[in-house]
Amino acid sequence: MPAASQPPPIRAAFARRLRELRIPRGFKTARRLAIALGIDENRYTRYERAEVEPDLSMLMRICDTLEISPNELFGASGNSQPAPMGGFGESSKNGEFVGGAENAPGRPGGKVAKQNAEADKRQALAWQLARELALVESGSEPSRRGNAIQTVQRTSRLFKEIEADPFEFVTKRVETPPLTTLEPKAQARIVALMEGLIEAVNRSALG
C-alpha cells in the first residue's frame, strides 16, 4: 500500500500556523471561521489539513477576518499577538472597533490621529509596492508564478525591506532589472507607487 504523500513544507507550515491562530482569536471551531470567511466548512478544513492552498484573495480575507498581518500569518512577526498594519485589523468587526483608541470613530482629530493616518497610508503604499514587485519576481509565465503563499511571502519580505529604508530601497530598485525590463505600463504603475510612498514618507518626516 503506497504511503500517503506529504504536503509541501510551506503548505504544512501554513496549515499549522492557521490552526494556531484561529482559536485565540475567538474561532473555537473551523466551522465558525469558515462561516466568517463565507466559504464551505469542508473547503476551509482542507486548508488546515494542508490538502490545498488558499488563493491570494482568500489569504487576504483570512488576514482581515483574524485581524492579523500577512507577516504574522506566515510566522514572520515573531509574536503571537495581532500586528495590525495598513489595511489589516483596522476596520469595524462584530460591532466593535478594532484598533487603538486614537483611531476610534467619533474621537476628535488631532496631531496623533493625523500621524497615525499618514503612517497607515505609508504602510498601505509600501504593501502595494511590495506586492507589485513580488509578482514581477514571480515571473509572467503561469508556470513560474509559484503558489499564492509564496507570493505573499515574497511580498512580506519586500515589505520589510521597504519599511527598513524606503529611500534606499527605491534607489536600488528603480535602476535595476527586472523593473527596467518591464513594459511601459507596468513600469509606470510601479514608479507611481514608489513616488507615492516617498511622498508619504516625506510628509510623515516633515510633519
Image (spheres, helix red, strand yellow):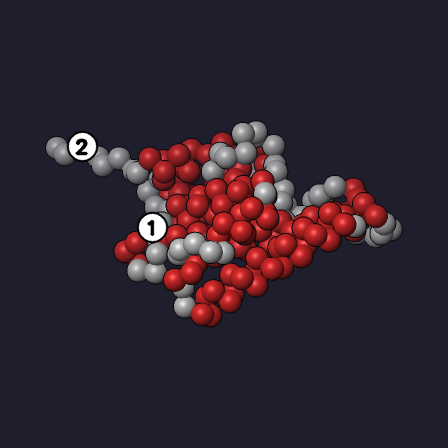
Residue reaching furthest to the left = 1
Q: Which mark is residue 63?
A: none
Q: CA distance from mark 1 to mark 2?
A: 26 Å
Q: Is residue 34 visible?
A: no
**Which residue is labeled 2 in the image?**
3
Q: Which mark is residue 146?
A: 1
| Residue 33 locus on image (x, y percent) | 52, 44
| Residue 39 locus on image (x, y percent) | 47, 53
SS type, badge 2: loop
| Residue 131 locus on image (x, y percent) | 49, 53
Is residue 145 or residue 129 the one in the foreground? 129
Taking the spot 59% from the left edge, 47% from the top edge, the residue there is: 166
Dot 2: few (<14), some (14–19), or many (≥20) neighbours within 10 Å?
Answer: few
SS type, badge 1: loop
Q: Which quarter shows the N terminus? A: top left
Is residue 24 or residue 59 the one in the foreground? 59
Quarter of the image where one finds residue 200: bottom right
The kind of residue tagged 1 is Gly
Q: Is residue 40 above or below residue 164?
A: below
Quarter of the image where one finds residue 144: bottom left
**N-terminal-most mark, 1 or 2:** 2
Taking the spot 62% from the left edge, 59% from the top edge, the residue there is: 196
Residue reaching furthest to the bottom = 185
Dot 1: few (<14), some (14–19), or many (≥20) neighbours within 10 Å?
Answer: few
Q: Is residue 48 visible?
A: yes
Is residue 106 or residue 116 the one in the foreground? 116
The kind of residue tagged 2 is Ala
Taking the spot 70% from the left edge, 52% from the top edge, the residue there is: 202
Residue reaching furthest to the top = 79
